[in-house]
Structure formats: structure tokens, C-alpha cells
Image (cartoon, grey):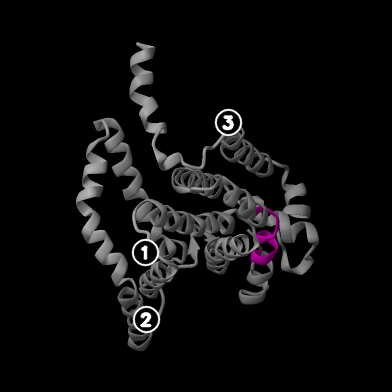
Amino acid sequence: MSEEIHACVEPLFSTHLFDANWETKDWVYYFLLVPALLMITFVLPAGIKEEYFILNPSEITAYSLFLSNYTHSSLPHFMGNLASYLAACFLIFNFETSKRSFYMYSIFMFLLLPWIISTTSLEMIGFQTTYQGFSGIVSSLFGYLTYAIYKFLKEYCCKSLNLTFLFLIILMNLVFVLGNISSQVFQYSLIITFALILVFLQKDVIIEVIQKHVEIRKWLGRFPNLQKIYLIILFLAAINFLFILPDLIPQDNMQNGAFINSIGHYTGYFFGIFVPIILGISSEKLS
């Protein structure tokens, strides 16, 4: 029986979707150690959290500027961010083509981004609330996932794909975000105009996809049914998360009595897209 189960499960983890060749230590770090540390910070005594972890604008400290991005106000808050973090990491593990790139980004994400989120939130939102939550870092992972999917598509599907694809995805997200805020026709018209220009710039990609659609269908058809279902679910999930920014920027900044730090979400999301681009360009120039 165990051999039959292994025969069914093994193909799921043998496709080039795990091209980064993740090792056991990678899975342990991202899927066990980080969640464990988040759990520890969540269950800390309230006095310790208030003194070191919660960013209170009336008593700003170096500790709270950094650690406020790793603690949570309630169990639903913690569980929601943890589930989103695990989902984003799992998809990144599938689509990332270079684990070194994700290693480098993780250093910036875990050590630099918390300072940026806290500083930007204080500057843009002000002093009328306290700040805590892992959602800014989770948002950055969704931004990085967009970049990872772009790299994956460029390597395996569309060689003519370029960075205008990322900008097009960003603009499409912003169009949906406008539905959550008070927007004017001019704003819609401006963004849609830029989006159409980017679509035109992607005409070579569109032609390549049309020409290769038969090859893609044949590629998908050669997998066993179980693996085929896995791949379809994976790609559908990826498409959903490509357009997640409107969910990160809700219309109502108060949900279940808690303040939603949309500025922190914005900051994390764009950090997750543009920092990997800069790191990738720098790496190419140095190599």
C-alpha cells in the first residue's frame, strides 16, 4: 500500500515546478521555524508585547519599530496571516527558479522591510492608532510571488516576456483597487490607458502564446491525472494571487473592530515586486 501511495504522490514533487531544488532545511525554515517564531511572539505575556512588540506612536522604540511586524492582536488575526504566509510560500516554492534569489530577498524582507513598513505607516497614517501584524511582510510575499511567476513564465513558456508584464499586472491590480476607494473617471481612464499601452508592448508575447498553445496542451496532457489536477489547481491559485492587491486594500479600514493597515500592505506588496527586480538586475551586472 505504501508503495502505491508513494507512486501517486512522488510525481507531484518531480516536475520542474520545483526547479529551485529546495532542500529539507528550506522547508523546515520557511514552513516550521518561521511559523513557530510567530506563534511564540503571539503567546507572549501582554506586558512584554506592550513594552517591546506593539508600536505605540506615543512611545516609539527601536524594538517596537521592528518587532511590531511579528506580533498579532488576536487569534483570528494571527491565523489569517499565518495561512496567507504558508500559501504564498508554497506557491513561491513551486514557481521560483532560483532559491538563491529567494534567500537574498528573504534577508531584505525579514530584516529591512519591517523598519520601512513601520516608518511609512507612522508617516502616512499618523498617531491615532497602534501598529502590529505580520500582514505587511505577507503582502511582500505576494508581491514576490508575482515576480517569481514572471520568471517562471519567461523561462518555461514565453522567452519574449519582459518586465512590462509585471507593470501590466500592477496596473490591472490598481484598476481593481480603484473599486475599493472613491475614484473618478479620470483615474480609471488614465490607468486603463497605460494598461492598454503595456498590452500593445506585449504583442510579441501574445503571438508567442498563441503559437505555443498546442505545445502547452501537449505538455499538460503527458502528466498523470493526479498530477494534472495538482498543476491546474496550482495555476488557478497563482492567477488568483496575481490579483490579490484589492483584497489587501479593503474599502473599510476597520474589520471586526481592528484597524487594517492598508499602507503597510501597499508598502510590502511593492517592496516584494521591485526589490527582487533590483536584486536581479544587480546580480546580472555583477556576473
Which residue: 52% across, 63% down?
273
Residue that sits furthest to the bottom in the current view: 186
Q: CA distance from mark 3 to mark 1?
A: 34 Å
Quarter of the image that includes the N terminus: top left
Closer to us: 257 or 32:
32
Tell me which numbered mark, 3 or 2, is placed earlier along the sequence. 3
Quarter of the image that includes the C terminus: bottom right
Q: Which mark is residue 194?
A: 2
Q: Which residue is mark 3?
A: 24
Mark 3: secondary structure? helix
Residue 217 in the image: above or below residue 163: above
- Reply yes or no: does residue 220 show up in magenta: no
Mark 2: secondary structure? helix
Q: Is residue 31 left or right of residue 90?
A: right
Residue 274, horizontal then vertical, whole percent: 55, 66
Tell me which numbered mark, 2 or 1, is placed earlier along the sequence. 1
Q: Which mark is residue 264?
A: none
